[in-house]
Amino acid sequence: MIRAVKGTRDLLPPDTSVWNAVERVARDLFRAYHYGEIRTPILEETQLFARGVGQETDIVSKEMYTFEDRDGSSLTLRPENTAGVMRAYIEHRLDQRPGVQKLFYIGPMFRRERPQKGRYRQFFQIGAEAIGSDSPFVDAEVIEMVVEMLCRAGLSGFTLLINSVGDANCRPAYVEKLREALKPVAPQLCGDCQRRADTNPLRVLDCKVPEDQAIINELPTIVENLCEPCGAHFAAVRSFLDDRGIGYEVRPRLVRGLDYYMRTTFEVAHGNLGAQNAVLGGGRYDGLAEAIGSPVAAPGIGFSIGEDRLAMTVDRAAEQELDVFIAPLGDAALRHAGALARELRRAGTSVEVAANAKLKRAMELANKLGARYALILGDDEIAAGEYTLKQMETGEQHRVARGEILQRIGQKN
RNA sequence: GCGGCUGUAGCUCAGCUGGUAGUAGCGCCAGAUUGUGGUUCUGGAUGUCGAGGGUUCGAAUCCCUCCAGCCGCCCCA
């Protein structure tokens, strides 16, 4: 038996209607914030990610689906989409278009990790990028938008965490300072942290081991060690968020795993997701454009939502709606039903026709499918030029003329 | 990539210390006489017991390998 490959999965109804609902909310909101859709290829040159995301990151060093094409070039299935959007921005000279370029995308990403709940090798992200401004106002607007999006999608009980990770000017100095501060206390930390203290001090801040927290809390924070411009930028972002009444928590220990992030970073966590508790992550990446070879500067900020995680956390509602179930009795009725169904569908109602069933069976199906109305169509009806329309929930049924059907079913209850 | 747990009908599962698969629940299909559902009753279909190998007279039950899922680590969305 051939099965879906490890870490990938089929999305089936009714789950797909939850996904569609989430995507509809996203598209509506993107429109409100004046974002336009961008669709970039799933396949990119490997170099794009090596230079954009960072050669040393886990994503690039061990999680990418990379292969050699027949002409010898190295291609990679995109593990994220910020680099791809930036590549397109540069390639098509979007910097020459007026205003900040606000672009959104919805699509699959690929990372070869060990699958787990909420973590797949092919997963979907809903994301957006605002490129062409380094203003903290843009940061606040992006963050406001994601909070709004999650709320409207039906997510509740989430926490918005923000931080600033500085820039090329102040971060290296901070990392050194952190490294120094860790030297005396490292032996008291967990094994992982002892290793990280040496290899990647910032990661120590992410440690979740309870015993380590007291020590980690005493370490110098990046927020206290920002250079003047970064400090001012972060303060501005916060006050803009305060102006909008958006609640957030400053998490000096929030560090992100992609090299391109600088200054503002943010994340939304949700309790019901187990170890994969991040629903959304994002941040500013003012140096990314240059890193992938742009001749012009292109400061930007963006985010991406884990659609798989969001869909599994959202209170599931959306069942597939069925307005009318037509039960034709006999061949003449079946032919009649085909034409009638077409007419109703063209008017925008969802219609199902029982192709070959007895009335009893048809009613049973109508019930199981959750149809709002059943329309019975037999020789009597054809002769009379009327249909028997039954409201499933109440059980009431009436004879209705063809022209009245739409009006009848229009009034939901 | 590392560690742990799990893997029996479409789904949830039972199957005691190995004896050769369940009257289990839900679902699905078909009936309970002629054009009417949601309740009830009756009947039915469906499994190479995740795959392969080993031990044994005999394995769903024990051992090994692999695969998949889940949990934790790592990382992130």
Image: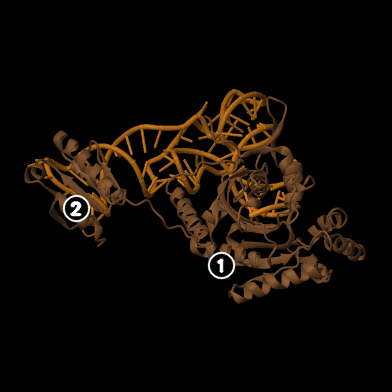
* Chain A colour in the picture: brown
- Residue flagged by tag 1: what amino acid is it? Gly
Query: Do the residues indicated by labels 2 and 1 lie within the same chain of the protein?
Result: yes
Q: From this view, report whether residue A131 is shown above or below residue B42.
A: below
Q: Residue at x 77, y 67 (%)?
A: A230
| The C terminus of chain A sits in image quarter | bottom left
- Residue A250 visible in the current orientation: yes
Local SS, label 2:
helix
- Residue flagged by tag 2: what amino acid is it? Ile
- Residue placed most toward the observer, A50 or B31: A50
In the image, is A296 to the left or to the right of A85? right
Q: Which chain is displayed in orange in the rendered image? A: B
**Residue beneath label 2, please?**
A405
- Residue A249 placement: quadrant: bottom right
Local SS, label 1:
loop
Residue A332 % position (x, y)? 14, 35
- Residue A305 visible in the current orientation: no
In the rendered structure, find residue A157 and report the number of the disc placed on it: 1
Residue A201 % position (x, y)? 84, 58
Please tell me which of labels 2 and 1 falls first in the chain: 1
Q: Residue at x 89, y 61 (%)?
A: A176
Residue A241 % position (x, y)? 63, 72
Residue A280 % position (x, y)? 62, 58
Of all chains, the one bearing label 2 is: A
